[in-house]
Image (spheres, grey):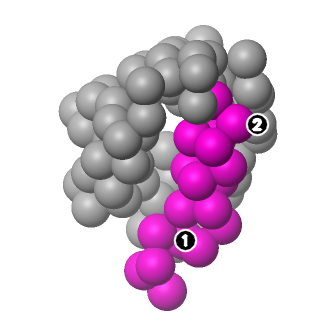
Amino acid sequence: MVEKILTVQNRAGIHARPAAIIAQTANKFESEITLTRDDATVNAKSIMGVIAMGAGYNTQLTLRAEGSDESEAASVLEQLFNSRFEEE
């Protein structure tokens, strides 16, 4: 299992567009991928789950990937967060 702490860096937070990008990217991998905020854990492959987290600017999330391609999945998703979902 790979675990990373990610910070939402885009000012608008995770709204529909970033949530769709996260889910579409996560769905490219076989690994089980989750995002956790406080006590809430959602499947990163679910757009609605990701939106429902209500992650605003500077929110820290824990990404967990477990499976055959876990390292690549975690790395690619970390890059998405670091690029601010290419919004800024």
Mark sitting on residue 84: 1
Q: State the image coordinates of residue 76 (x, y, percent, origin top left).
A: 58, 53
Residue stretch rendered in magenta on the structure? 70-88
The image quarter in which residue 8 lies: bottom right
Residue 5 magenta: no
Horizontal side of 41 relative to 54 (left or right) equals right
- Residue placed at 63% from the left, 62% from the top? 79
Q: Residue furthest bottom?
A: 88
Residue 75 magenta: yes
Q: How far apart are marks 2 and 1 (CA)?
A: 16 Å
- The three-letter code of the residue at mark 1 reads Arg
Dominant SS type (magenta): helix
Horizontal side of 42 relative to 80 (left or right) equals left
Q: Nearer the viewer, residue 33 or 57?
A: 33
Check if mark 2's residue and mark 1's residue have beta carbons within 8 Å. no
Q: State the image coordinates of residue 73 (x, y, percent, origin top left).
A: 57, 40
- The three-letter code of the residue at mark 2 reads Lys
Q: Which residue is under mark 2?
A: 4
Q: In the picture shown, does residue 4 fall above or below 67?
A: below
Do we see residue 36 in this rendering?
no
Q: In the picture shown, does residue 36 fall above or below 56?
A: above
- Residue placed at 42% from the left, 80% from the top? 87
